[in-house]
Image (cartoon, rainbow, N blue to C red):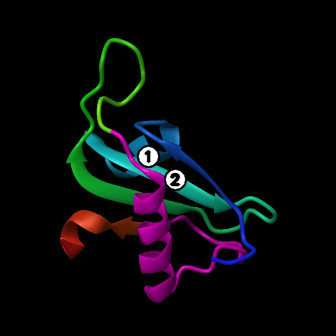
Amino acid sequence: MTGVEYRWRVGRNRRCCEYHLGTLGYVVEDAARPGTTLVVETGRPAVMEPDPVPAELVLPREVAAGIRAAWSSGWTPRCDGSPFELRLSAAG
């Protein structure tokens, strides 16, 4: 990941909800040239408080591990295409 910056969002936003209702997830894209979005499902329940902030945290190191796992599974962030789904719960 050296020299590459990514933007990511956590929670049950529209993109995450389209794929993984009820679970905590995050969406990642290349900050310089968005292409294929990475949609990661953590397998953990998305416990939402009264406001739209997840009660669980997703730490940057977890996002970095998800990006590495997606790379090894064939994700190409700068190529255009449909969202690339990664289910971390299936891996662990």
**What residue would you read off at disc 2?**
27
Question: In the rendered view of the protein, which quadrant contains the C terminus?
Answer: bottom left
Residue 85 lies in quadrant: bottom left
Mark 1 or 2: in front is 2
Secondary structure state at the residue bearing disc 2: strand
Q: Residues within 10 Å of mark 2 (few under 14, many from 20)?
A: many
Residue 47, percent across and down? 24, 30
Q: Is residue 59 magenta?
A: yes
Q: Quadrant of residue 31?
A: bottom right
Asked whether 92 or 83 is in front, the reply is 92
Q: Give the magenta-colored segment's residue range.
A: 57-84
Where is residue 6 shown, x and y percent of the image? 66, 60
Q: Residue at x 43, y 68 (%)?
A: 66
Which residue is drawn at the image coordinates 57% and 58% (left, top)?
Answer: 28
Contact (Cβ within 8 Å) of mark 1 with mark 2: yes
Dot 1: element: helix
Q: Position of residue 48 (x, y in %)?
A: 29, 25
The answer to whether 75 is drawn above or below residue 83 in the figure is: below
Give the residue number, with chain letter if any, for mark 1. Answer: 16
| Number of numbered discs | 2
Q: Residue at x 41, y 25 (%)?
A: 53
Which comes before the other along the chain, label 1 or label 2?
1
Q: Amino acid at mark 2?
A: Val
